[in-house]
Amino acid sequence: MSAVGAAIQWKARSDPVPGNPVDLDAPGPYVDAGEFPVALSTAGESEVDGNFRECVPEGPPLVGQIRTPQQHHALGPRGQFPVPRENHPALGLGDPEDRFVRETPRVRRVAPDDAKVPGKAPDHLVGEEPRHRHGAGEYGAGITLAIHIPRRECVARCPPMRLFGTNGIREVVGEKFTAEFVARVSDAIASLLPAGSSVVVGWDGRTSSPAFSQIVAASFVLAGHRVTELGLLPTPAIQYNVPRLGADLGVVVTASHNPSEFNGLKCIARDGLEATRDFEEKIEEATERGASSPVRFDRVGEMVHDPTGGRRYLDGIRSQVDLAKIVRRGFSIVLDCGNGASVPTSPALARSLGCRVKTMNAHVDGTFPGHLSEPTQANLVDLQRAVPASGAELGIAHDGDADRAIFVDATGRYVSGEEMLTLLARDAVERHPGSTVVVPVSASQSVEDAIRPFGGTVVYTRIGSPTVTHEMQARNAVFGGEDNGGHIFPSLHYARDGAMTLAAVLDLLARRDSDLVRLLQELPRYTVVKEKVACPVVLREKVVDRLIERFTPVSEKVVTLDGVKAYRPGGWVLLRPSGTEPLFRVYAESKDAQRARALADEGLAAVRTALDELGTSA
């Protein structure tokens, strides 16, 4: 049993809604019944996710070519996993003023969240020459495109099955993600490690995660490895612990923000970074051939439980901020844990920073009864109303495995990921003038604008957090992240980290003696429009070719780092094939909202025209 699991105490339930315990004695001026009824409709709203599956290719980074016209543990109903809010033995922190109690919303429909799940393998012919070669070239002052030229080998067989997406394996439980599948993959991973390796295993709050984690652990133990089980913790907490425990590998059972029917596996290298694509390919090859490395009875490994992983992680975060200043400020916040893996860590962290905390969805439940685990604007309408209703200074929401943090300001306004990425990038470079920030090619121009006065350099990569983190490490960047709330603070570790983001924002507000509304008003203002259009996987490369032909003559420049990014008068439009679904993502940005919309429409029309010319209409 894990440290978190050991803290579970059975007690009689009085709540009328499964997975939503009612604390009638909880303080708060909200309603007489002791409940905060925030089960609100989200019908008609949607959000497009900005995460995509990409590979981390091998080789040193090169400067990209610029084209111009000139050239879960189920203990109760519905899979709930109650975690005590007070005196958690693994954290030693607690406070009676705890939570908003919510009703389970009646779901009218599922808001589109573009779940990151593995799609079909890339349409690549073995031995085929690259369609678009990249050579050295500068992308303006202080701007670099990070390109890796992948190794290509001619082999007389088809490439192995593609299992890993941008952030690990994610599949539907009971369909592809079964006990047999997890055992096969785990056996394959175990066979790749030297005998007697040390492996860390942890999991999120999905209903199937505890069971699958036992399968994972058993595979490694039966292959002669030593397993340290950390239990239910955020993915970044597990990443933080891997190098500090001296482990050779970490495996997390998680599907991050995907809907409740999904689960997955993520591999963590010994340095705490997400595994490289090269290692993932070795796993895929080993899985395909059914590799395993069972040992004799007298060489079976051992499994130990470490109850200190959560405390070690929070101590690390607190060491990165000015604790005294934050405590003196005495922030009032609303924290939406989303019924996910942040429950045993983020509320405790916020209270240890002296915050007055109201929590929402602060018990682990793998069915995500509060709202879908993707922290989109459509899914956080309750938080947007709770923050001003409670008089809080800001609200914070995590996704299912807490590697992301999304903010709501004191007025109840949902703060976009682009804004928070820009704010934190500016702060990092202002404190370290002349330093480097790494972001994906989809990032807002506002990042470049915000750090230029401090001599900062922006390095753009392909989309995907593993690509960003590895590039940050290679370039000794002071900050990096994506526009979806995934921020990376290398002074702590190279991982997207929702709890560290929470602490960093509080630290920023305390140092500036300001509030989130005022700081965001200082940033460059851009409008970003995100769309998508269906596209068969087999036509992706041909569509890219036609888009390059279409935009190169009429654009200021065209970047083919990841799809086609065309810089047009008044803004830019990015058109890229999804790595997880049969569609093209369309991003457009401009300081003028109408121009941004026009650029997005131009991009959509260009993709549809290319499909029509190829004989397939969207």
Image (cartoon, rainbow, N blue to C red):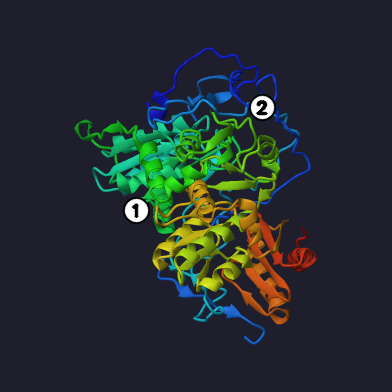
Residue bearing the label numbered 1: 271
> Which numbered disc covers residue 11?
none
Q: Amino acid at mark 1?
A: Asp
**Vertical arrangement, residue 393 with respect to residue 549, above or below:** above
Circle 2 crowding by C-alpha within 10 Å: few under 14, some 14–19, many from 20: few
Residue bearing the label numbered 2: 29
Residue 72 in view (yes/no): yes
Q: Considering the image in quadrants, where does the N terminus appear?
A: top left
Which residue appears at 29% of the width and 43% of the height?
Answer: 245
Which residue appears at 66% of the width and 66% of the height?
Answer: 574
**Residue 339 at x, y = what percent?**
56, 33
Q: How many marks?
A: 2
Q: Quadrant of residue 537?
A: bottom right
Q: Secondary structure at mark 2?
A: loop
Name the residue furthest left. Answer: 298
**Residue 141 at x, y = what percent?**
54, 79
Q: Amino acid at mark 2?
A: Pro
- From the viewer's side, name the closer residue of 26 and 159: 26
- From the viewer's side, name the closer residue of 466 and 503: 503
Q: Considering the image in quadrants, where does the C terminus appear?
A: bottom right
Q: Earlier in the sequence, mark 1 or mark 2?
A: 2
**Residue 111 at x, y = what percent?**
71, 42
Given this view, does label 1 or label 2 mark the residue nearer the observer? 2
Q: Mark 1 and 2 residues: CB-CB less than 8 Å, in contact?
A: no
How many angstroms separate mark 1 from mark 2 (CA)?
A: 47 Å
Which residue appears at 37% of the width and 42% of the height?
Answer: 315
